[in-house]
Image (tube, coloured by chain):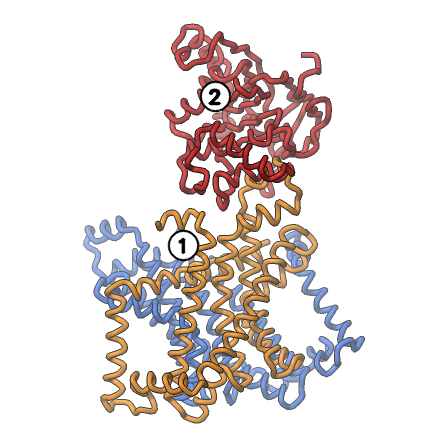
Chain colours: A blue, B orange, C red
Amino acid sequence: MQGMTLAGFRYLPLVLLALGWEAVARLNIIDSQALPPLTHVAVAWVDLVRDGELVENGASSLYRASIGLLLAVVGGGGLGILMARWRLLDVFVNPLVELFYPLPKSALIPVTVLWLGFGDGSKILLIFLGCMIPVTIGAYNGARGSDQALVWSARSMGASQLRLLWDVVVPSALPELLNGIRTALALAFILLVSSELIVSQEGFGYLIGYLGSTGSYEGMYAVVLTVAFLGFAADRLYQLLMQWLLQWRE
Amino acid sequence: MAGIESTASLAAAEADVTRDAARRLDVVFRGGAGVFSVLVLLIAWELFARSGRVTAFMLPPFSAVVERIYGDAASGDLWINLGLTLYRATAGFVIAAVGGITLGALMSRNRLIRWIFDPIISVGFPMPKIAFLPVIILWLGLYDVSKISIVVFDAIFPVVTATLAGIASVDKELIWSALNMGASEREVMWQIKLPAALPQILTGLQVALPISLIVAIIGEMVMGGYGLGGAMMSASRFADSRGVFAGIVEIAIVGYALIKAMAVVRRRLLVWHQETAERS
Amino acid sequence: MDGKGQIVVERVTHTYRPPRGRTVLALSDISLEVRPREFLALLGPSGCGKSTLLYLVGGFLPTEAGRIMVEGKPVTAPGPDRGIVFQHFALFPWKTVRTNILYGLERQGLPRPEREKRAQAFIDLVGLNGFEESYPSQLSGGMKQRTAIARTLAFDPSILLMDEPFGALDAQTRLLMQTELLNIWKRTPKTVIFVTHDVQEAVYLAERVAVMSARPGRIKKIVETKFANRDPSILRSKEFVEKVDELWNLVRDEAIKAQETKAT
């Protein structure tokens, strides 16, 4: 109980911010068009859910992000671990990974659109390509750090390469790998929203743009806040997942 | 304070990788294997593009892309776009840097300010803040102000987090020594805490700079018009694949240049630091 | 004593309150007097609160119960009359040796030529010529400590508070630094409170040694350790060794007690 009140106190400024928003909007300090009261935004949100618009577009967005991220995690994780174990691959691929790391991933938006058009495919490809890098780096660094002594003793006990990977390398690589995935998660949201804002026929970004261009600003705010909150919630949930996964290590 | 601590660990993870990006570029361009790989990549690109397995539309040859860049440079288009993007990214970065360090310093000194901004930062950090771009456009229109504003909104977070973390980790004996010598609280903040926190603050800035570039480009892509992002999106819409690839190469070069520049600045400013001493 | 010492600690109690975890009673009803220009050692096992007492005298921690008076006035804040030297040097890493030493002089508002002259004088005093423009990261442990000492001496405090200043140095450097400190002290006599857990160091350097009990800290006994001279040869003299023995016996019980409380 005490924990909850403490948490409430910590987040109180956000509540105050919400109240402030409501007050400023109602007092018409800023043009009421540009800043509708928070209560109106809430009503619009409910409407959008009821209409199905929010859910449909949301599902589409989350579908794209999930597939892209999943492919990135599997592909990037696998690549990173293989690079750490297989010297030849490392020497060749490492400089390429490091070359692409500093590239602003948003630069890939126009080319994926060029290749795959406006639909799901381009978004999934974008997120896959963009998110693969942090996952690969995390997996690589994590696998590199594998305690050599553990590896040798497992080998001397006759462990096959696959067993080795599963029992020794992956668990010790886990923290760095999980951190890399966390970065990728945040990046996935950014790339998703960006690409949908720029060009899309469905999804959160599309819905925001559509509501904005038709003057339904309350609805626009509602979707913006929904997406922002989802990004935040995804990170927090992922942190819990990380803690849960890592507790087995100890 | 779990909120800001978990944010800090995310920030730290990103900071580690970003700050090392410069060192990684050294790996690429100084290590023989690095240059070799890049050359192989470019040659493979060229050959694959010419092989006929893909259309020139899907993958224009590297040589054609270079030609295009050269053409844009000669006609002046490249410089206009580059200049605009750099202007927006840099302006946003500078505002985020000054604002972020100031806010971080204030938060470390004043409990009330800290309490107010703590949840805003820890909740805002993992949000895709680019989602707020339409709101900013609604308020500020389709001009540079909006682009710079979204850059500031995105880039300020890592700076504040880094400043807070840096100041918090200042060795208390340094502060006590300064107080011992008669320094006032204000002198301690400006003459001791901030210089001592500089390594971490610089790391935050090194994370914020690529963010500034990325967000400026995204902003341009959404809003259209001039700038590297806008030009690339136009090219994409007009199925001008050479233009799109030229844009990727240009943005890549700008991105690397900025990272290297930050690394040089870091080394100059931190000439006294352990890590610099170890490297030399 | 009669309450007329330069530094008077009167029945001070201090509780350490960490942000997380239980509170710890560091000092309990401790009293001590220090005469002007005397070299006093605070000797005790680790955790006994001797550093805490030093920080209280320095004004870095607030006195909650009891009184601490310096020159008849209560201690409320740190100040340049009580210069401190830390075990880990606390040098400003972004400043050179010279600018580190200059910092205190700048705070005092001395005019520039005088600042430079004084700084150089102290660099000479501790034997760091040629290293004025070096950064702390380029110096050895001994050189860093010399810089720290020069920095504190430069603003001429009448009292010197030293918190195990040679604890981070290797044994040979430590011995050299101890002798140097004595030489410096002879030339510019100041009141010194020297915190250490090393019995031999305390006996060698100090005129009086205050032995502290294990936590919560109290003064167990004060022993006179004045010798006719202080050059390193006395370290093997019978008189010296007997003194060390006497003090070691006083400390040993406290050290064992400290170990036991740590285990619980």
Residue at the far top in the pictured view: C238
Instruction: Tell which subunit mark 1 falls on.
Output: A
Amino acid type, label 2:
Ile
Residue type, numbered disc 1: Trp
Question: Answer yes or no: do the residues labelled 2 and 1 have beta carbons within 8 Å?
Answer: no
Identity of the residue furthest to the front in this view: C113
Q: What residue is shown at x 71% (from left), y 75% (from top)?
A: A38
Element assignment for label 2: helix
Q: Of the numbered discs in the image, which one, if any, rests on residue A248?
A: 1
Q: Position of residue B244 (x, y in %)?
A: 40, 85
Q: Position of residue C23 (x, y in %)?
A: 61, 35
Q: Is residue C231 visible?
A: yes
Task: State the residue at coordinates (70%, 54%).
Answer: B112
Q: In the rendered view, tell whether residue C167 sits above or below residue A52.
A: above
Label 1 crowd bin: few (<14), some (14–19), many (20+), radius 10 Å = few
User: Residue at image x 48%, y 26%?
Assistant: C259
Indicate the quadrant where residue A211 lies: bottom right
Left or right, C98 with respect to B21, comes to right
Measuring from the top left, give residue B218's x and y in whole percent: 51, 78
Chain containing mark 2: C
Residue B210, position as x, y percentages in the image: 47, 68
What residue is disc 2 on?
A: C256
Nearer to the camera, A77 or A1 = A77
Reply above or below: B107 against B229: above
Identify the residue shown where x is 46% and y is 81%. B79
